[in-house]
Image (cartoon, grey):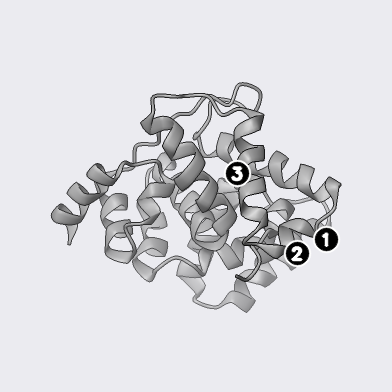
Amino acid sequence: MSGYLLSYTSASLLPHESEIVAKLYIELHDWDSVRRQVVDDNILQKGTLSTRKREFVEIKKRLQTLTSDQLNFYETATSSDSRYLTMLSCLKLYKFIYDFLSQTVRDKLLLFDYTIFNSDYESFFDSKRVAYENLNTISESTQKKLKQVLFKILEQADFIDSIKNKNIQKPYLSEKLIELIVQDDPKYLRGFLYSDGEIDGFIKRFR
């Protein structure tokens, strides 16, 4: 099995920045033009050139996973749906995050267990070492950053109340966003912690 893509460590959720970049792309339909505004013109008002380049690369990769309907939804989405759209792009690009949410976190929620412990993350990480070779070759500092940024993303996406407490908060997506996910691939609703029963209901409604 090929390794997990772990580059989310170079940029957390960045919901506001992702929305701006998405709307720019909707307007310009040209990634080179978007890059110029973000990197050269510093439209996101980031300090250093290296930060602008690094974050733009990740945001672009994330947004390119979205369907055209999902991407265009940024135009009319509420602030919470915009944040969840950005999280959807992360679930689609980074299988590591999707697997952790759809397996470890969702399973806890379904058992009415609402707190993520460090041991839950460590068990998940260790269970994936067998299938994903690159988890065995990364340094200890990278392992620490993977965990740190993952929980930062979960906090920014409102999946947990805080990095410190890690109490699970189930997201509630609008019907429109659920429909856009179902029409693409309903499996991603597992990443938003919906049960199989709920997902089956959505499939019947929106397909």
The answer to whether mark 2 and mark 3 are in CB contact below 8 A is no
The percent coordinates of residue 164 (x first, y second) are: 66, 23
**Residue at mark 3:** 124
Which residue does the image show at 72% across and 57% down from the upper left?
Answer: 135
Which residue does the image show at 34% across and 42% down from the upper left?
Answer: 194
The percent coordinates of residue 173 (x first, y second) are: 34, 42
Of the two numbered discs 1 and 3 in the rendering, the one whose residue sits closer to the viewer: 3
Q: Name above or below for residue 28 compared with residue 168.
A: below
Q: Is residue 18 visible?
A: yes
Residue 67: assigned label: none
Placement of the N terminus among the 4 image quadrants: bottom right
Tally of numbered tags: 3
Which residue does the image show at 31% across and 57% down from the upper left?
Answer: 186
Q: Nearer the viewer, residue 40 or 21?
A: 21
**Residue at mark 2:** 53
Residue 50: assigned label: 1
The answer to whether mark 1 and mark 2 are in CB contact below 8 A is yes
